Image (spheres, helix red, strand yellow):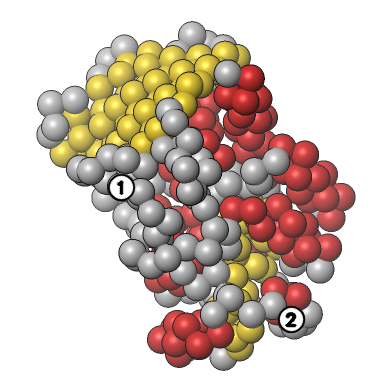
Amino acid sequence: MKVALAGAGAFGIKHLDGIRHIDGVEVVSLISRDLDKTREVAARYGIGHVTTELDEALARPEVDAVILCTPTQMHAAQAIACLKAGKHVQVEIPLCDVLADGREVVQLQRETGLVAMCGHTRRFNPSHQYVHKKVAAGEFAIQQMDVQTYFFRRTNMNALGQPRSWTDHLLWHHAAHTVDLFAYQCGSPIVQANAIQGPIHPTLGIAMDMSIQLKAANGAICTLSLSFNNDGPLGTFFRYIGDTATYIARYDDLYTGKDEQIDVSAVDVSMNGIELQDREFFAAIRERREPNASVAQVLPCYEVLHALEQQLQRG
């Protein structure tokens, strides 16, 4: 299977590292804004074709699928371009930052029958898979999720400490992980959602702090705190409080409520959530089936985010 990858930044490199461990998949085209930097990354990973234009890669007949690791504001339009070009597509989170655009992607996927998936990595992290399997087996019922998503980004820098050409967003990007995961893990749709946010940053034009409350139809609740102002441990930390146990998930690792590590090495074929996400994408293409985290499956998350955005604007 031959793949084009758009976005040679921090997250694009994570995908390239993961794909190295997947047999039968080759990245044949790398697309990014800075041609010189893109050539450097391509040389490191043995990628033969480099361009700054997605359309150029889509025109290559050998390309079967595309992974989009581009700025948020491009995701929906680029996913639509890929589907119209007859290419399977995996778009990194978020699917969109305007609900109507996300709905258009879902509609086009249905019309084309191609695989279209969104990078909701938390569905694939071994830590969260472990909890999901406990819920599915009837051994654990979530009563509450308490989630902290904390970064220190008072300037517009990416995960590699490099200047960004676009502005990240707590609601449409970072909250999307938890909103989707909460409904997915509970196996129950979100029926109530509330949000408040802190002051708008004078130059970035976004709220740097946010708090979200969610309730699922089965009664489970979720509290999510997000900040770009946090000067301390960085990342997202999930506490699952249930009827039989408490679990704390830190990316691919899992702990008990007493901070005892749980061995999740046998949960899947890898301990790398990004690699597992990519494996699902390629397997769905080969098996001609809907993938976990298909654009249709994650659309309800963006409907909740849209409602929260309207609430914040009114507030």
Q: Is residue 140 above or below residue 113?
A: above
Q: Which residue sits at x=12%, y=34%?
A: 260
Report the amino acid beneath label 2. Glu
Locate residue 138, reporting x and y percent. 41, 19
In this view, the mark in front (2 or 1)? 1
Give whichever of 114, 23 is nearer the camera: 114
Dot 2 or dot 1: first in sequence order is 2
Q: Which residue sits at x=36%, y=42%?
A: 228
Residue 133 in sight in this render: no
Residue wearing tag 1: 152
Give whichever of 14, 24 is nearer the camera: 14
Residue 56's mark?
2
Q: How many residues crowd mark 1 within 10 Å: few (<14), some (14–19), many (20+)?
A: some
Label 2, label 1: how many angstroms apart (C-alpha)? Answer: 36 Å
Residue 78's mark?
none
**In the displayed structure image, the side of residue 167 where residue 234 appears, left or right:** left
Element at label 1: loop
Q: Which residue sits at x=70%, y=41%?
A: 98
Q: Quadrant of the C terminus?
A: top right
Q: Is residue 23 above or below residue 171?
A: below
